[in-house]
Image (cartoon, grey):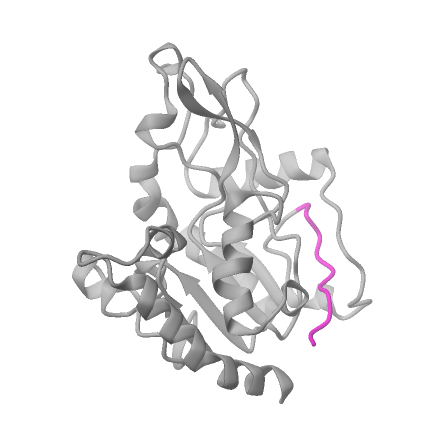
Amino acid sequence: MGSQAPMTLRRFRCKDRRLNGDRTRQLSTPDDLTLQLTASYLSSLGITEPPVFVGDVRVSVIPPKQMTLHGVLILGAYPTAKFNRFDGHKVPVENITEPFDPETASGKELDDYYLNHLGISRPQCWITNLLKVFLFKPEHIRPADATIRHLARDEFNRLASSPANLEWLATELRIAAPRLVITLGREVAGIVRRIHGGKQQNALLTGLIEEHEFASTMYRWVHLPHPGIVMRGESEQNAWPNRHKEFCAALRSPVKEILTK
């Protein structure tokens, strides 16, 4: 099993030299450091006005909390949020505490449909997202909230594929030094592989472990379907749930071998 990574949250793009010390300390995320990290991250993406939830609660960067070196890096698209219902609308109101927080629906989906099926546990993983901030879908915005500053879901590809964001990912990969990277969903796979178009991105979701270069470094990758499409259930229009089960069953043995070498 890999060791836990010490990492400063004053600036997420810390260098590998910070890993020369104690590798067992679990990091905290104090509010002041989170604010500094959020400002630095958003600024690098060209976002000058911080997005907010209802009630002027700031949307924060959600850095990884589960950070195991030399293990499996789980790469989702972007973090979810905590929700409340107002006037029949499901409205995001607050930041979650970590990517795929085990107390959230997305965290439980990761555990139940990915980690458990692959035979791996959270302590063997570095769990993160390609984009580090929550994005609002149209249904998240009530008419009364139309003027709040927010980042829209349809901005994902532009923001996530920007050179600045990919530099953040490259730094995170250098620090994590994963033995395997598992991406979730065609958009994430397409961005890290620089493949455009939904059909071409879907073709990346093979469930096969392959070596590909990212930021001048070779990593092992496996691209799996997005939790949303896996959760919809098998139908004539959606073959991904069964494909995903087949992928995970075939991956259990090679993933175990990779982690025990």
Image position, residue 87 (x, y; %): 41, 13
How many marks are shown on the rendered structure?
0
Q: Nearer the viewer, residue 246 or 254?
A: 246
The residue stretch that appears in magenta = 1-10
Q: Residue furthest top?
A: 144
Camera sees residue 217: no
Q: Nearer the viewer, residue 220 or 36?
A: 220
- Residue for point 57% across, 34% down: 95
Q: 64 above or below 189?
A: above
Q: Is residue 55 rendered to the left or right of residue 2?
A: left
Camera sees residue 207: yes
Q: 160 above or below 222?
A: above
Is residue 51 part of the magenta span, yes or no? no
Image position, residue 54 (x, y; %): 50, 18
- Residue for point 40% across, 54% down: 227
Image position, residue 131 (x, y; %): 45, 48
Image quarter (top left, top right, bottom left or bottom right) of the C terminus:
bottom right
Q: Is residue 241 rendered to the left or right of residue 236?
A: right
Residue 146 falls in image quadrant:
top left
Image quarter (top left, top right, bottom left or bottom right) of the N terminus:
bottom right
Residue 40 falls in image quadrant:
top right
